[in-house]
Image (tube, helix red, strand yellow):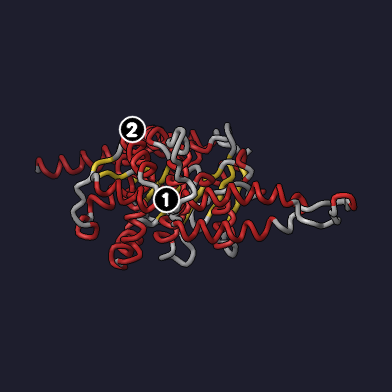
C-alpha cells in the first residue's frame, strides 16, 4: 500500500510540474512577436531563421525546443541536438531552457561543435583508436610553427636566409587553422589559386580601359604590374600551404592536437564507418544550429552527414543577417547558399525583426 501511495504521489508531482511548465511556456509564448511565434511553431522539416542582434534568437531556439517536447511528435529530450559555437552560448542556452522546461533541460544535448565531437570520440573509442594526445596551447602551437619555419625546404618560396625569419609565423598559423576548419589540403589551395589567377586576367579591374599609344597600351590589355602583384601574393600562399603537412606531422609527433582536429577525426570516422554514422543519425531526431553563418567547411560537412539520413530532415538553423546572409557574401557564407540550395524544395525561411 505504501508503494502504491508513493507512486501516486510521484505521478501527482509530475503532473503538477507538467502543468507548471506548460503555464510558463504559454506565458512566454504570448510575449513573442508574430515572426518569433512562427519560428517556434515550425516543428517539422528544414527551417532557416534569419535573426540579427536584438531579435530574440536565443529565446526562439529555447522556446522551439520546449515546444518540441510539448508537441505531439513524441520526441524525447535526449533525441534533440543543439549546436552552438561557444561554451558561453551553450551555457546560456541551457540556463534559458532550464527556466522554461525545468530539469528536462539537462537531458537535451546542447554542445559546441568541438564538445559534441569530443563526446562522440570519448563514447566510441573503438573507432578512433588510442589517442594519447593533449590539446595544444597557443604557445605550443606557435613553437610548432617556428619549428616548421626553421626547417622550410630551400626550394620553398618562403625560405629566408637573413632578417627575421619568423615574420610569417602568425600568417601561417591563420592559414593552417583555415585549412583545417575548411578541410582543405595544399592541392585544394593550389587548384584554387590557378583558377583565381586565370579568372582575374579577364576582370575589368585588371584591364586597361583606354588605349595609350605612347606606352604601347591598347584598351583591354592586361595591367601586368597589378597582375604580377596579385600573382606574387598567391604564389606565397601556395608556398605556405605546402608547409601544412609538416605542421600536422610535427603536432602529432609531440602528441598535440587542436580543436579543429576533433571535427576532422569525426567526419573521417563517419565516412569510413557507416554503422557509427547511422547510430548518431538515428539518435538525434531534431537538430538545431545557432550562428549558422559561422559554419566552416568541416562543421557543415559534419552536420550534413548526420542530417542526410532523412529525406526532409528536422533541421533548424539560425543565422545573423548582419553578416549579409541574403547576399551570400564572405568566405563562409557560401555554406548558407549551399544549405538553401540543398533543401530548396522544402525549406522554410523566417526573418526575425
Residue 227: % across, % down: 68, 51
At 58% from the left and 33% from the top, the residue drawn is 53
Dot 1 corresponds to which residue?
154
Of residues 276 and 233, the one nearer the viewer is 233
Q: Position of residue 187 (x, y in %)?
A: 47, 60
Identity of the residue drawn at 69% across and 55% down: 200
Q: Could you say which disc has been placed on residue 333 in the image?
A: none
Q: Residue at x 60, y 46 (%)?
A: 330
**SS class of the residue under badge 2?**
helix
In this view of the protein, can residue 34 be seen by the observer?
Answer: no
Which circle, 1 or 2, is nearer the viewer? 1
Position of 169 compared to 6: left or right? right
Looking at the rendered structure, the secondary structure element under dot 1 is loop
Measuring from the top left, give residue 218's x and y in whole percent. Answer: 85, 56
Q: Does label 1 or label 2 sit earlier along the sequence?
A: 2
The reply to whether residue 84 is in sight is yes
**Real-space CA distance between mark 1 and mark 2, rounded to the nearest whole angstrom:** 26 Å
Q: Between 153 and 130, which is closer to the camera in this rendering?
A: 153
Residue located at (44% from left, 64% from top) = 308
Quarter in which the C terminus is drawn: top right
Amino acid at each position: 500500500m505504501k508503494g502504491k501511495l508513493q507512486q501516486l504521489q510521484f505521478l501527482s508531482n509530475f503532473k503538477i510540474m507538467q502543468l507548471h511548465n506548460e503555464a510558463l511556456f504559454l506565458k512566454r509564448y504570448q510575449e513573442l512577436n508574430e515572426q518569433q511565434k512562427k519560428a517556434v511553431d515550425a516543428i517539422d522539416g528544414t527551417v532557416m531563421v534569419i535573426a540579427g542582434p536584438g531579435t530574440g534568437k536565443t529565446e526562439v531556439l529555447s522556446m522551439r525546443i520546449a515546444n518540441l517536447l510539448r508537441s505531439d511528435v513524441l520526441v524525447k529530450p535526449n533525441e534533440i541536438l543543439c549546436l552552438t559555437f561557444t561554451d558561453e552560448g551553450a551555457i546560456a542556452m541551457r540556463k534559458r531552457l532550464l527556466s522554461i522546461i525545468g530539469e528536462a533541460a539537462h537531458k537535451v544535448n546542447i554542445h559546441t561543435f568541438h564538445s559534441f565531437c569530443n563526446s562522440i570520440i570519448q563514447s566510441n573509442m573503438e573507432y578512433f583508436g588510442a589517442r594519447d594526445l593533449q590539446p595544444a596551447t597557443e604557445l605550443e602551437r606557435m613553437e610548432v610553427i617556428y619549428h616548421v619555419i626553421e626547417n622550410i625546404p630551400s626550394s620553398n618560396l618562403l625560405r629566408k636566409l637573413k632578417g627575421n625569419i619568423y615574420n610569417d609565423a602568425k600568417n601561417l598559423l591563420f592559414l593552417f587553422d583555415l585549412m583545417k576548419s575548411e578541410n582543405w589540403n595544399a592541392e585544394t589551395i593550389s587548384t584554387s589559386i590557378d583558377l583565381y589567377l586565370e579568372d582575374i586576367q579577364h576582370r575589368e579591374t585588371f584591364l586597361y580601359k583606354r588605349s595609350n599609344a605612347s606606352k604601347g597600351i591598347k584598351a583591354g590589355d592586361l595591367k601586368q604590374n597589378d597582375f604580377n602583384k596579385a600573382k606574387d601574393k598567391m604564389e606565397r600562399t601556395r608556398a605556405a600551404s605546402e608547409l601544412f603537412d609538416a605542421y600536422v606531422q610535427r603536432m602529432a609527433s609531440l602528441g598535440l592536437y587542436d580543436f579543429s582536429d576533433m571535427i576532422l577525426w569525426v567526419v573521417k570516422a563517419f565516412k569510413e564507418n557507416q554503422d557509427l554514422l547511422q547510430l548518431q543519425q538515428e539518435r538525434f531526431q531534431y537538430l538545431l544550429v545557432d550562428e549558422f553563418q559561422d559554419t566552416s567547411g568541416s562543421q557543415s560537412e559534419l552536420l550534413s552527414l548526420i542530417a542526410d539520413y532523412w529525406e526532409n530532415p528536422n533541421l533548424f538553423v539560425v543565422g545573423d543577417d548582419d553578416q549579409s546572409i541574403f547576399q551570400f557574401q564572405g568566405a563562409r557564407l557560401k555554406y548558407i547558399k549551399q544549405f538553401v540550395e540543398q533543401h530548396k524544395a522544402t525549406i522554410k525561411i523566417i526573418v526575425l525583426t
